[in-house]
Image (spheres, rainbow, N blue to C red):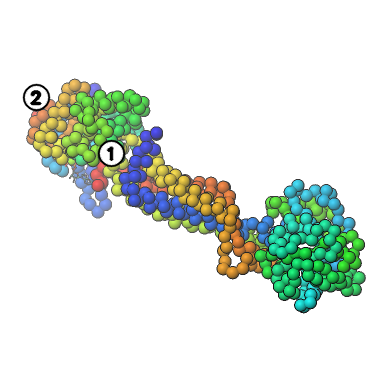
Amino acid sequence: MNGTLLLGWRNIWRNRRRTLISMSAIGVGLFLVVFYSGIVGGLLGNAKNELDNAGMGHVEVFAKGYRPKRDVAATLAAFPERAALQLPADAELGTRVLARGLATSAHGSEAIQLNGVDFAAESLLSAHLRQVKQGALPVDGDGKGVLVGEELATRLNLKVGGKLRLMVQRADTEMGADLFRVRGVFHSIAPSIGQRQVYVSQAAARELLGLSAATHQAVIQLSDPVQADAVAARLKVTLGEGYEVLTWAELVPVLKRMEAFTDTVVFFLAMFVYLLVGLGVLNTMLMSVLERTREFGVLLALGTRPARIVRLVIAESFWIATLSVVVGAAAGALLTWHFSQSGFHITGGGESFQLEGATIGTLVKTRFNPWDVVRAASFVYVMALIVGIYPATRITRLQPAEALRRT
Amino acid sequence: MPTVEVQNVTRVYEEKGMPPAQALRGVSLSVEKGEFMALAGPSGSGKTTLLNIIGGIDAATSGEVRVDGQALSGLSRAALADLRRDRIGFVFQAYNLVPVLTAAENAEYVLQLKGVPAAERRARVKDVFERMGLGRFLDSRPLKMSGGQQQRVAVARAIVADPAVVLADEPTANLDQRTGAELMDLMHGLNRERGTTFIFSSHDPMVLSRAQRVVRLVDGELERAEVRGP
Ligand SMILES: Nc1ncnc2c1ncn2[C@@H]1O[C@H](COP(=O)(O)OP(=O)(O)O)[C@@H](O)[C@H]1O
Ligand SMILES: [Mg+2]
């Protein structure tokens, strides 16, 4: 081994307890930064999940005039086939027929939001369609099947196989009503979704509304939210006038803000932790170097160049950094990875909370990003370099004879 | 060409809040190759200061020092370090071995600085240790050795790279009479066998009696009369 590294290695074990304390401080700091950025990243930085929780899209398309008053007559009449939309290959696309209405059972009535969907496409877009707790999704061609949420089922005392009457205002302003059978009951982490959202096939919804062959909303979820602006811009060109194309940043601005916020929070947390840890370790290194002033004087007298003294002290902080990084980053990465698989709950009650229209799940799966670990570890090495150089220059400023005089 | 040439060197210590201290007042001295020379003088007379300046670990306030013809004034810190590495060996009163290195590694360190390959380093150190009766201490840690043993290792470290001059500041002051005498015999033996030049300081008559030549410092000045020994 290189002589300087070897000497540095032996020197750090002269005061074992002090070295272990320094290493724990760095290790714990590193662990905190890695794990915390995993949590914050998982909680706030995962717009894909949050949109999926509520069945929202990264890009949504409406007919001009639909959104202000939810005018059921404003339909996506000539909406093109997927192939013409030039979406990324892994983008998820679904269309919905929408209407507000009333659901009535023998037990009572509740205001609902009717969704006429293609169940296969919709279950990719809405997390709760993958959480059917009783019964099943209505099958293709089932014109009388309805899927309701647990909350609505409770209020209206609905069971799978039970009857439910849906009533909406038609496009021609008449009332449309029909009798459906409950095929399944879904669970959503947001009670408001379970209470309001009701799903039937697109054909059934159109018949109820008196529409021939149209939908109201096209929903696109992307694997990478960053693509949203580009996809939306392309759609605007492809679709031309008559359509309103909106990105998730426009639909739920809070999610966008949170993503930016996440990076800032993690950055400042990391800075704060490293500053504290760095000052602590700097102080320790300074003590450890200054109490060996005479020994460095001996090395200088033997013909060691001042630059080599600096390297020797840096070698000591290099070893401390390396051991701390191995332990701290490994622990942080392991735990972050573990919770990126299983997740954990951040607040006491409930599976979600609402934030300015976004549904945020309280089951947080940490975001495991190897780059977070690499970045954090690099920080520690830079810090080690700094805390090595300063104490060393305190020595090399002295005449060797003066260093030798110190006890 | 003398191995060490000191020309009219002064050293004034200036410390904040203290009157300036004149440690050396125009010292001139010439030491030839192979000399075994003592620097005598009471405590505070400037012995340590003079040895430090000769060895390039302290700077003269005025005057010039040459080692092997090389003037020390004006050299950068790195150049001075290289000069010490190549031409000077130090032995200190307090042994000053590096505690985390074994006895052999302490001596090897100097060869390592010179870029001597590991196998050769080891062989040279082993050879020197055996000649100096240190063979069984090769792998001992300094703090497990007696003062006399540590000081022998310090001497081995000082001579292993064949310097032009070994500077020993009161090398026996921490040793008892017998161990001190043995150390002097050892250094004298090395001086004769290898022709290494030694300058050592002391105020112990036993030590001074072994020197070939004794120069005496009083209040930072050399006394005219020099004593020539055996
Ligand atoms: N670092 C220093 N600061 C101020 N005065 C010093 C310093 N080192 C030595 N001196 C003074 O210089 C003089 C010579 O000291 P020194 O060379 O150590 O003498 P010796 O080695 O002969 O005892 C003494 O008066 C001492 O007090
Ligand atoms: Mg002295």
Q: Is residue A317 visible?
A: yes
Observer-nearest of B47 and A198:
A198
x and y, in percent, of residue A132 in the image:
71, 62
Left or right of B105 on screen, residue B152: left
Amino acid marked by disc 1: Val
x and y, in percent, of residue A270 in the image:
51, 55
Quarter of the view holding residue B51: top left
Left or right of A273 on screen, residue B104: left
| Subunit bearing disc 1 | B
Instruction: Check disc 1 and report the residue beneath it.
Output: B98
Instruction: Give the quarter the ligand 2 occupies.
Output: top left
Left or right of A282 on screen, residue A55: right
The quarter in which the N terminus of chain A is drawn is top left
Observer-nearest of B184 and A303:
B184
Element type where label 2 sits in the image? loop
Q: Disc 1 vs disc 2: which is toward the camera?
A: 1
Label 2 near ligand 1 (CB < 8 Å): no
Query: Mark 2 packing: few (<14 Cα in 10 Å), some, or many (20+)?
Result: few
Residue at the image point whose x is 36% and y is 26% from the top: B117
Tell which circle, 1 or 2, labels the residue nearer the N-terminal end.
1
x and y, in percent, of residue A266 in the image:
55, 56
Instruction: Name the mark on residue B230.
Output: 2
Observer-nearest of B130 and A331:
A331
Left or right of A226 on screen, residue B171: left
- Whether B122 is drawn above or below A68: the answer is above
| Pointer 1 with pointer 2, Cβ within 8 A | no
Observer-nearest of A345 and B217:
A345
Element type where label 1 sits in the image? loop
